[in-house]
Amino acid sequence: MPATPLRDRAPRPTTNDPLRFGSRRTPALHHPGAVDTAVARRHLELIDEGDVLTNVRARGEQLARALDARVAGLAGVADVRHLGLMAGVELDPPVDGLRWGRKVSAGCVDRGVLIRPLGDVIVIVAPLTTTEAEVDRIVDTLAEAITEVCAPSPTPKQ
């Protein structure tokens, strides 16, 4: 959720024209400021009601342990960094231009897990409501894709 300032009340139209809100030509009930405020307020209420932050701490610790145990030691992995439900897995291709990050990302997507590369760093940003099983699936899928893409190719026999 982007940072959204909360207001005590929704903004009021500045004209009597129902299709005009200030200088924008949008219906007053759909003014982005009012909608953003309502959504942000409800989002914060749901975080409190569902004890989401307790889940974030538990799943963040699980993600860190799983990445360290099942991904950090794989061939082609240079570094694993994590904080909460965010992680970066830095790949170490033997030469430039192999596009390992893109290939690993595609391998994960093919297996049903959406991640994204930033160059040769695989970025994981799990949802706040991620379950224990989903963290395991993310890490297992990532490990499979890294192994598929980054494993050393067999040397041809001569």
Image (cartoon, grey):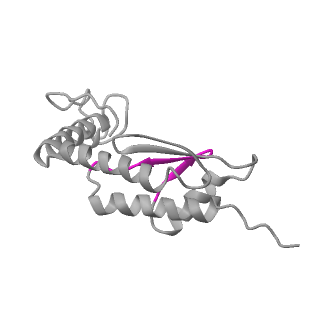
Q: 154 or 53: nearer the eye?
A: 154
Residue at figure coordinates x 26%, y 26% from the top left: 14
Q: Is residue 105 left or right of residue 112?
A: right
Q: Is residue 131 left or right of residue 110?
A: left
Question: In this picture, is 150 found above or below 8?
Answer: below
Question: Which image quadrant for residue 78?
Answer: top right
Q: Position of residue 99 (x, y in %)?
A: 68, 52
Task: Work out which residue is located at the far right of the displayed protein and give it.
Answer: 158
Q: Position of residue 25 (x, y in %)?
A: 37, 38
Magenta region includes residue 40: no
Question: In this picture, is 66 found above or below 84?
Answer: below
Q: 103 or 48: nearer the eye?
A: 103
Which range is magenta? Answer: 114-128
Q: Position of residue 107 (x, y in %)?
A: 56, 64
Magenta region includes residue 120: yes
**Rendered-image quadrant of the N terminus:** top left
**Rendered-image quadrant of the C terminus:** bottom right
